[in-house]
Image (cartoon, rainbow, N blue to C red):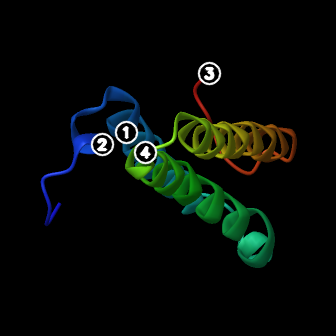
Amino acid sequence: MFLNLNHYKLDVYKSARELRSECYKILFQLPKCEKFNLTDQIRRASTSVVLNITEGCSRKSELERKRYFEIARGSVIELDSCFDIVMESNYAKLKI
């Protein structure tokens, strides 16, 4: 937030930051045995969503922007699979 950049105004950017925040809250419910597996994966994927939206917004080429947004979407899908595992393993109480 040091610069006044366009992505700060986007709803998708705000939603991505909220998603990351919610993911981090759930991480505290996961067992220590998942520290280097699910916990790390969720942390990286949720951060990737935010960062790829940010970087995509900085690209001048529409093709490049779309590529970064596709990567962000892929990370959201990855998170969905991670939370399927969390629920199947009864690691956390998630509201659907």
- First of labels 1, 2 by sequence position: 2
- First of labels 2, 3 by sequence position: 2
- C-alpha distance separating marks 4 and 1: 18 Å
- C-alpha distance separating marks 1 and 3: 22 Å
Q: Is there CB contact under 8 Å for labels 4 and 2? A: no
- First of labels 1, 3 by sequence position: 1
Residue at horizontal 46 percent and vertical 55 percent from the top? 55
- C-alpha distance separating marks 4 and 2: 13 Å
* Residue that label 1 marks: 13
Name the residue type under label 4. Answer: Lys
Q: Secondary structure at mark 3?
A: loop
Name the residue type under label 3. Answer: Ile
Q: Depth-wise, is mark 1 or mark 2 nearer the camera? A: 2
* Residue that label 2 marks: 7
User: In front here: 67 or 37?
Assistant: 67
Residue at horizontal 71 percent and vertical 75 percent from the top? 35
* Residue that label 4 marks: 60
Residue at horizontal 86 percent and vertical 47 percent from the top? 89
Which quadrant of the structure image shows residue 32? Answer: bottom right
Q: Give x and y (percent) for residue 74.
A: 73, 41
* Residue that label 3 marks: 96
User: In front here: 94 or 76?
Assistant: 76
Q: Depth-wise, is mark 4 or mark 3 nearer the camera? A: 4
Position of 39 relative to 96 (above/below)? below
